[in-house]
């Protein structure tokens, strides 16, 4: 069976047995809770290990500036985290990061609180809020070295959701599937307005599969204007 140990070895992550055990325990918690709460459509453990765990961890395999993340104490926020992807796997693999998990659904936040407690994870904060509301909180706005998101939305929408959380000099990294050139062309204006600049796109195949992954890496060059993000729902209805 191709489990997270298989993918860790394949990706040269060098994860210890304790970390691998914690990733498996996390998977079991998600799958058990999924029986009563919709957390994921992926219920096969082998598929879960690839499409959730290995995918979440692929940031530290394919994006050069985050290869030293395991030893880092940088602040990270996962916007629209859902069941905790990619934030929880990154925290397990890289316990030195200071992690914030933000989601709009309170029952998912309660589940994540259980995960954090059960796995004994330190320096993890959960926030129940929509991205547009969270980015208006003084303790969160301009507060993070790294903003990550696997949320399903176009880049011009994600930029408005995520860039306000990044410090000047920090980064927003969006996990995207496949080709993103057209999305980025549409998002050029919004990225600039929100204080960002496109650094590059890192393209890769997800470990031992033909699944294509693109990391869109945006540098925060200046503070996001106070007008953004707009009211909840506006970014999706009227993208910048």
Image (tube, grey):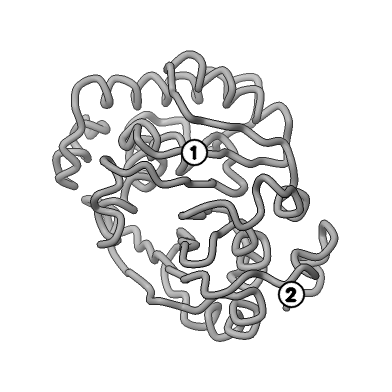
Measured as percent of width and height from the top left, residue 22 is found at: 34, 21
Q: Nearer the viewer, residue 131 or 52?
A: 131
Q: Name the residue under label 2.
A: 239
Give the CA distance from mark 2 to mark 1: 28 Å
Tell which circle, 2 or 1, labels the residue nearer the N-terminal end: 1
Q: Which of 50 and 44 is in front in this view?
A: 50
44 above or below 11?
above
At 61% from the left and 32% from the top, the residue drawn is: 126
Measured as percent of width and height from the top left, residue 59 is found at: 34, 53
At 50% from the left and 22% from the top, the residue drawn is: 116
What is the residue that sits farthest to the top in this orientation?
118
Count numbered badges in the picture.
2
Left or right of 227 in this view: 89: left
Q: Name the residue under label 1.
A: 99
232 above or below 77?
below
Left or right of 167 in this view: 215: left
Left or right of 33 in this view: 119: left
At 47% from the left and 54% from the top, the residue drawn is: 145
Measured as percent of width and height from the top left, residue 78 is found at: 54, 46
């Amino acid at each position: 069976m191709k489990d997270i140990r298989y993918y860790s070895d394949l990706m040269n992550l060098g994860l210890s047995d304790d970390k691998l055990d914690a990733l498996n325990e996390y998977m079991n918690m998600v799958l058990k809770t999924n029986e009563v709460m919709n957390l994921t459509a992926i219920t096969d453990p082998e598929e879960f290990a690839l499409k959730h765990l290995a995918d979440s961890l692929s940031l530290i395999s394919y994006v050069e500036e985050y290869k030293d993340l395991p030893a880092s104490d940088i602040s990270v926020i996962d916007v629209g985290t859902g069941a905790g992807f990619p934030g929880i796997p990154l925290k397990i693999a890289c316990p030195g990061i200071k992690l914030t998990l933000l989601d709009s659904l309170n029952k998912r936040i309660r589940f994540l609180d259980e995960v954090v407690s059960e796995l004994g994870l330190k320096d993890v904060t959960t926030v129940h809020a929509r991205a547009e509301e969270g980015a208006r909180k003084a303790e969160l706005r301009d507060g993070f070295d790294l903003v990550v998101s696997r949320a399903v939305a176009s880049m011009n929408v994600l930029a408005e959701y995520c860039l306000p959380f990044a410090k000047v000099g920090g980064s927003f990294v969006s996990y995207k599937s496949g080709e993103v050139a057209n999305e980025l062309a549409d998002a050029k204006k919004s990225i600039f307005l929100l204080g960002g600049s496109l650094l590059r796109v890192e393209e890769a195949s997800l470990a031992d599969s033909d699944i294509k992954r693109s990391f869109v890496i945006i540098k925060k060059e200046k503070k996001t204007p106070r007008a953004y993000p707009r009211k909840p729902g506006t970014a999706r209805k009227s993208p910048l």
